[in-house]
Amino acid sequence: MRLDRDVLSIIIPAYNEERNIEKILGLLEKQTIEGFEVIVVDDGSTDNTPLLVSSYVPTKYSLVLLQQQNRGAAYAREIAINKSCSRFIAVIDCDDSIANDTLEKAIKPLLNSKVIDISLFKLNYVNNVGGEILKVFTYYTKNKILDGRDVFNNCIRFWGVHAFGIYKRERILHSYAIYHELNRDKKNYLNNDEVISRITFDISNRIIITDADYFFVNNLQSTTRRINKNYFKVINNVFLLKRYIENKKETRQSLHVMTDIQALSISTVWGVTVRYLKWRKFLNKTEQLQWQELISTASIQLISAGKEHNISISIKNKLQLIIIRCLTRKWILC
């Protein structure tokens, strides 16, 4: 199956991926479709990643290399999306994998329907490329065609669907514009893409779940598993998502949605607090104060919001807030 040039772009963010980049580019050569575009965004690599990409000569797709200073995956994706002229966009990570017919299976529903905006892959978890499937992602529903707003409402406290798939480019661009209204300085809060994905679900018409296989590799070297001195910044994104929800007229009175975002916010602040306690010996005094200040401010805001909106929370979340507030008071005294 050959696609017109303006149909599909595959975006591959890459940072120091010299071990994986040729592997994923070769994998795309095996797809049952051809004529698509591949855009690799080098996010300030210090290894041979850009050299390997620039010297690679594909036969079934066109290849573009974009380079930027290290600014994070969300910004890298945005640059590539803006560069692309395709109607549909998919993002694939360097260390992951897809089946040979994945792109064909996922693009067909989008080409055959005007109301489907997102075609999701079947997400399989593996330890290495070609390895045994350890787990398959479980959706919040058994339905295959979903309403975008319903998907959003089921991706607040927990991820009721994943975000791996092919998207209408116009929907992603719209969600980036909305996110930039919330984050006007375009700061990298590490998981910007998680908020952007949720917004994209919310503004989409229909989302389809396909059997197009995507293999997510559990990467032991992932930055999420290493000490990250900026990790505390993810708190900012949960509050941006909270503001997005509070600004939506139709959810302003929805107790279910407000309860879910409150639970997510508490869990996020708790997660940052736990990491702070584990990592603080690796942080200098200034860095410790940055973590402490944001954790303290966030916990105060959450307590205030809970009282203002009369939101009931679980015993677990209550205990988490109590412990966080005790810790922040102790930090102040020290």
Image (tube, rainbow, N blue to C red):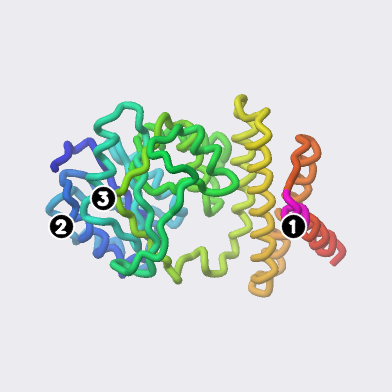
The three-letter amino acid code for the residue at tag 2 is Val
Q: Earlier in the sequence, mark 1 or mark 3?
A: 3
Q: Which residues are magenta?
A: 314-319
Q: Position of residue 92 (x, y in %)?
A: 34, 53
Quarter assignment of residue 249: top right
Q: Earlier in the sequence, mark 3 or mark 2?
A: 2
Q: Position of residue 210 (x, y in %)?
A: 33, 44
Picture residue at 50% right of the left edge, 32% below the top: 149
Name the residue nearer the viewer: 78 or 263.
263
> In the image, which is nearer the foreground, mark 3 or mark 2?
3
Q: Position of residue 23 (x, y in %)?
A: 25, 64
Q: Is residue 104 above or below residue 115?
A: below
Report how far apart the C-alphas of labels 1 and 3 lie in the structure. 42 Å
Quarter assignment of residue 98: bottom left
Residue on which disc 2 sits? 57
The three-letter amino acid code for the residue at tag 1 is Gln
Residue on which disc 1 sits? 320
Quarter assignment of residue 170: top left
Picture residue at 68% right of the left edge, 44% below the top: 262
Circle 3 SS class: helix
Report how far apart the C-alphas of labels 3 and 2 lie in the structure. 22 Å
Q: Residue furthest top?
A: 249
Question: Is the C-beta separation of discs 1 and 2 under 8 Å?
Answer: no
The three-letter amino acid code for the residue at tag 3 is Thr
> In the image, which is nearer the foreground, mark 1 or mark 2?
1
Other-residue count near label 2 (Cα within 10 Å), few / some / many at <14 / 14–19 / ≥20: few
Q: Residue furthest right?
A: 333
Q: Residue furthest front?
A: 142
Residue on which disc 3 sits? 102
Circle 1 SS class: helix
Position of 252 with respect to 56 (left or right) is right
